[in-house]
Image (cartoon, helix red, strand yellow):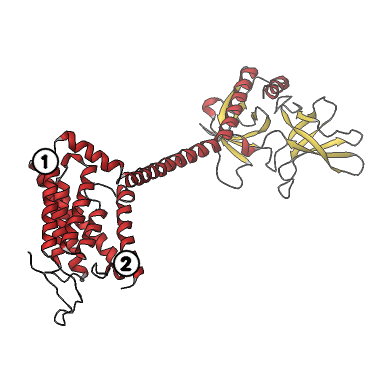
């Protein structure tokens, strides 16, 4: 243990240890001193051990402990940050649905109010949207023969006319919306001054989701903003269901009739719940029910 | 040996000490995470005279004891012995070999843990067995792996001899 090993450069083992010494007397003595001090530390009574440890922590180890604390704070901050980010993402996701939920809530409230105002002779149904390009032309509604739905029943939403039932199954029915090329309805201006036939404007171009009011006598003019309602003529639709609002002149037929563009009151794609009028309204005016619905919204 | 290499040697050791108090807390279970401070001691002791290795071990152990007063003194004694033996080991082993260094890191950590566990008298029965046979070997392994990585990255700086410094 106390030998002095000079271990100079040795061609035999190839290491260049130079003047390194492994363990001299001084080294051994230092080792023994350290061992003795260690035993002394082990045998320290608690009332001395505590202050000594505290002194080391508050002096030599203080910056290292501060570093450790900062590191743990940073780790905790990162963890909290990730939690906060996750919460924020969840909130954002929920917020994206909030307007839609509010809108649906409003529609449901509107339907509820409309049903109360209509009294009887209606069935509430849910629109079963399909992911097809033609789905706005015909809708599937969750009410059928069991609920008393019949063909040619008017389908409305709180905003106005959506379409007409074309086929009825036991539990569902097919609704031809106003966007369907074959849809027609007798219509009138809100004041009853002008009558005509409402039909879809077309399936091409920017105006494809508009209606047109045809057959308006040439001498009659319909100002923009005029509300168009069902007229009740023909007995299919009750009188007074809002169809849309006139937004301009679409064309004139050689001096004897005019055609007006009408912005629909409700878009088929926006309808999630509808009311199917099953009877009892006859040609009676249901205008008041929709006016109150419009006012309540 | 260039003066800059000497500074780099100490910088590497200081970096290991910093890692002990910054990175180690994020490396999972405290019982298995690599002991950067002991690694710094071993790297120093392997390249230092035995007396300095023992003294460095005593200081490191005393500081560790200050952080874990339940075994006050045991850490100092264990680190002293490990530091001394590591310094003496280069009379026996080919200390420049990476595998030998890895083995010394492993053995040094395991011996240190065994000494602390036994000298402190805090662990008994199955707990002692788990510490000696499971947790200590795992920590020794992770420490040895980090040691090899350090020697591989900073091999040139750590090849410095203390007698040259």
- Under circle 2, the secondary element is helix
Query: Which label was assigned to residue B88?
Result: none
Residue at (31% x, 64% y) in the render: B9
Residue at x 29%, y 69% (from the top left corner): B155
Q: Residues within 10 Å of mark 2 (few under 14, many from 20)?
A: some
Tell me the crowding category of disc 1: few under 14, some 14 to 19, or many 20 or more residues within 10 angstroms, Cα based.
some
Residue A283 visible here: no
Q: Looking at the image, which is closer to me, B55 or A13?
A: B55
State if disc 1 and disc 2 touch (CB < 8 Å): no
| Vertical arrangement, residue B161 with respect to residue A41, above or below | below
Q: Position of residue B149 (x, y in %)?
A: 28, 63
Q: Which of the pair A25/A129 is nearer the observer?
A: A25
The spot of residue A84 in percent (x, y) is: 45, 39
Q: Quadrant of residue A276?
A: top right
Which residue is identified by label 2?
B6
Q: Give the image quarter of residue B7.
A: bottom left
Of A203 and B50, the residue lying toward us: B50
- Which residue is most to the bottom? A11
The residue shown at (26%, 38%) is A54
Task: Give a yes or no on whether discs 2 and 1 share a subunit.
Answer: no
Badge 2: chain ID: B
Dot 1 corresponds to which residue? A43
Between A118 and B6, the one lying in front of the other is B6
Residue A81 vertical placement versus A32 (above, below): above
Q: Quadrant of residue A83?
A: top left
């Amino acid at each position: 243990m106390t030998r002095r090993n000079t271990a100079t450069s040795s061609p035999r083992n190839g290491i260049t240890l130079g003047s390194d010494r492994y363990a001299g007397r001084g080294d051994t003595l230092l080792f023994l001193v350290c061992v003795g001090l260690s035993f002394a530390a082990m045998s320290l009574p608690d009332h001395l051990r505590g202050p000594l440890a505290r002194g080391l922590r508050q002096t030599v180890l203080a910056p290292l402990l501060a570093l450790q604390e900062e590191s743990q704070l940073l780790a905790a901050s990162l963890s909290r940050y990730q939690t906060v980010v996750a919460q924020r993402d969840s909130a954002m996701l929920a917020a994206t649905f909030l307007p839609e939920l509010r809108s649906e809530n409003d529609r449901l409230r509107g339907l509820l109010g409309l049903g109360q105002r209509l009294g009887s002779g209606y069935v509430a149904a849910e629109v079963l949207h399909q992911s097809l390009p033609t789905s706005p032309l015909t809708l599937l509604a969750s009410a059928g023969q069991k609920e008393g739905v019949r063909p040619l029943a008017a389908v409305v939403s709180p905003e106005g006319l959506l379409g007409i039932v074309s086929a009825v199954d036991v539990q569902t029915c097919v609704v031809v919306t106003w966007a369907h090329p074959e849809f027609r309805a007798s219509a009138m201006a809100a004041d009853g001054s002008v009558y005509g036939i409402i039909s879809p404007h077309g399936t091409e171009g920017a105006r494809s989701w508009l209606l047109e009011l045809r057959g308006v006598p040439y001498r009659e003019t319909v100002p923009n903003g005029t509300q168009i309602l069902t007229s009740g003529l023909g007995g299919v639709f009750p009188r007074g269901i809002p169809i849309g609002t006139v937004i301009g002149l679409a064309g004139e037929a050689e001096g004897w009739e005019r055609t007006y563009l009408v912005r629909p009151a409700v878009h088929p794609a926006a309808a999630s719940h509808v009311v199917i009028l099953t009877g009892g309204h006859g040609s009676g005016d249901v205008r008041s029910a929709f006016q109150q619905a419009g006012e309540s919204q | 040996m260039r003066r800059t290499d000497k500074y780099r040697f100490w910088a590497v050791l200081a970096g290991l000490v910093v890692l002990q108090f910054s990175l180690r807390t994020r490396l999972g279970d405290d019982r298995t995470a690599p002991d950067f401070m002991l690694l710094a001691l071993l790297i120093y002791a392997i390249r230092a005279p035995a007396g300095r290795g023992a003294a460095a071990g005593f200081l490191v152990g005393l500081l560790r004891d200050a952080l874990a007063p339940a075994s006050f003194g045991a850490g100092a004694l264990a680190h002293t012995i490990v530091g001394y033996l590591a310094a003496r080991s280069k009379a026996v082993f080919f200390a420049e070999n990476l595998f030998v260094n890895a083995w010394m890191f492993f053995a040094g950590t395991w011996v240190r843990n065994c000494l602390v566990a036994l000298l402190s008298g805090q662990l008994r029965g199955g707990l002692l067995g788990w510490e000696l046979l499971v947790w200590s070997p795992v920590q020794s392994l992770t420490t040895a792996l980090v040691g090899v990585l350090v020697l591989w990255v900073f091999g040139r700086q750590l090849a410095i001899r203390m007698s040259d410094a």
